[in-house]
Amino acid sequence: MSAIAGIIRFNNAPVDRTDFQRMQQVLESRGGDQFRSLTGPSFACAYAGFHFTPEDFHETQPIALPDGSYFAFCGRLDNRPDLIRDLGIKSVEADKLSDSAIASLAWLRWSTDGLKRWIGPHASLVWKPDDQKLIMLRGAPSGRSLIYHQSGDTIYFSTTLDALFALPQIPREFDDGVLADVLLGAPSGSDFLYKGMASIPTSHWVELTPSKRTDHRYWQLERGLMLKFKREEECWEAFEELFSNVVRQHLRRTGEAGIRLSGGLDSSLLAAFCCKELAAEDQVLHGYTRIPRPDAELPETLGNRYLDESSKVRDLAALHTNLKPNFIYPDDRSILEGLEDWFNANHTPANASPTFQTGYRPLLEQARKDGVKLLLNAGFGNHTFSYSGFGRLSQLFKTGQWLKLRRELHLLRKKGYNTRHLMIADVIKPSLPDWYCHWRIRQKAKQAPSWEQFSAVDKNYARETGAQDRLQEQQNVRAYWDYWSSWRQRSEPFQLARQIAQGGGADVLYGFDQRDPSGDRRVAEFCLALPERFYLRDGVNRRLVRCGMRHFLPRSIVDEHKIGLQDADWFARVERNREQIKQRYRQFREDPDVSQLFDIEKIDEMWAEFDATDWRTAPRRKAVRMQLALLGPLHAGSYVRWFYGKND
């Protein structure tokens, strides 16, 4: 994806050309297909872009607008045809306009009142020198990073942190409180990970003047607004029409199209819709499916999960003949190899196992070799169209429809679901009052830290930085998830506006754009406005896909009620790299910047537990705890050492 970086001076002061050249050089060093810049008396902006869509070849930004202001846009407009129509642009003219040009025309026509019309991930800014106002905005519900540092009357901005860190006057230092929140898994605050940095929230536009900052939210999901259909079939038809349009618009590209494909309902349905669109162009869809290593020992106690999704993908390819599947397993490289490349592209630590991230590395590299310029995924599918519908169980309970509740549970039991678990997780816990949930979590925290199952952060560090209290005050997603209603669980990723770190970076590492049509705003608004009965009725959960979209998928996928197990060979890969991992932890112990963050003794105890466990028969819950609390620090601790220039 494109990147922007630059400097703005209030009070019409001149821009320091040396600082701007440093920022330009960083953007150019990251790579791209096009580089441009624009300077004014108090404004300088550099742009670096990749040609991921045909319209990117017509890029002319940064743009000097007719009213004397300056405009920069980093991202994509997925509803481009709608904006062209509403702006009255002739088709012969539209073909030669980049997305940034259309966004600038939309800005001139509607200003901030029209931001809801912009659908797609983007970060943009408008500098009005006559009014001494800087307006910065991000897409809804997702947008590219937009970060800035203010020093006196100077604003340094960029979509990538390394352009800011290239300036000697900008500190390169963590905010300990935010870092602690990250290590606990899900920060909810508005502060940024690095001191002296601030970010623009998603779904917001922000106005900066010499004296203040004002934030304005222009979009959010509204609870209670339900769609109505006379017949369920009408809902299915409406969704199919909507999703076909969304997928078509997401398929703009300059090279091959690919998809990260599992045997699940969400990515399989997206692949089916893509194949339908691409067949009209006589094009193929490259599918990339991760499978376990053939030489690895694998779990035997799977519960409601299965290991290898390749047979289901083959069935899907038999139904959609322009799907070209690729089955790829993790290679022999260390789980620690290549982390520095990821850090350099993302500038973000993660409380996640490196086995997960590096396990997908061969898959992404193969996509690059195949000439893929667009790699799709359906990461938000379980929140939108392939939602389980289990929230209806709580709804039936609360409204006194207990016979219907009993019937649904009985039918679900026949399909292999644990109805005792469903009663606790989807009926009882979401029905508890908020005061009890807070009390219960506080009581459990007195016995053991609330994060014990998913983090090895040091207790003293968590307490001294305030992260321990914020975990409850901000209702950390991992601590409170079980007590949330189904609507909140589904809507949370779309409602969260914060940006605590940069993220992104696949375009730099692999040279392709990653997109998720399942999280498109139009899909989210439609799917979260459907009554629960459209997702669960007569014992059929995920009903919108299983019933309404059945004609797109093979029976082996539609009728499968188990879930594919990702990263199934994690413990075999850890065993293969055990000496390197132990050496990395020894480095952590001797490094005060890292050892203060983690409970090293707990990590040692967990490592002994790892050695004593037969992971073929271990419970899934124990495996998840090890992946997060034992291996998660490998990623985060290595990032801290990389950030301070200490990794070997």
Image (spheres, rainbow, N blue to C red):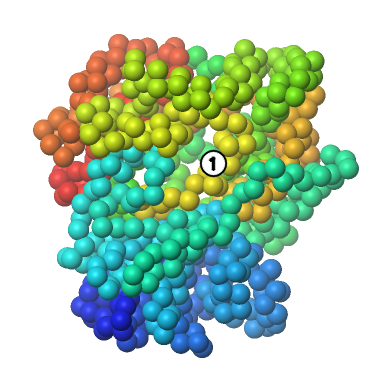
Horizontal side of 56 relative to 593 (left or right) equals right
* Identity of the residue furthest to the left in this view: 590
Horizontal side of 95 relative to 586 (left or right) equals right
Horizontal and vertical percent position of residue 153 = 27, 73
| Quadrant holding the C terminus | top left
| Quadrant holding the N terminus | bottom left
Between 397 and 6, which is closer to the camera in this rendering? 397
Dividing the picture into quarters, in which one does residue 128 lie?
bottom left
Could you tell me which residue is drawn at 62 percent across and 32 percent down? 486
Horizontal and vertical percent position of residue 600 = 20, 25
Between 580 and 314, which is closer to the camera in this rendering? 580
Horizontal and vertical percent position of residue 592 = 12, 36
Horizontal and vertical percent position of residue 325 = 58, 43
- Residue that badge 1 annotates: 492
Could you tell me which residue is drawn at 25 percent across and 47 percent down? 175
Q: The residue tagged with tag 1: helix, strand or loop?
A: helix
Could you tell me which residue is drawn at 27 percent across and 83 percent down? 13
Q: Relative to 56, does residue 291 appear above or below in the rendering?
A: above
Could you tell me which residue is drawn at 58 percent across and 42 percent down? 491
Q: Label 1 is placed on what type of residue?
A: Glu
Q: Is residue 144 visible?
A: no
Q: Tag count in the figure?
A: 1
Q: Relative to 169, does residue 174 appear above or below in the rendering?
A: above
Horizontal side of 199 relative to 153 (left or right) equals right
Q: Say few, some or many: other residues with alpha carbon within 10 Å of mark 1 (under 14 / 14 to 19 / 20 or more).
A: some
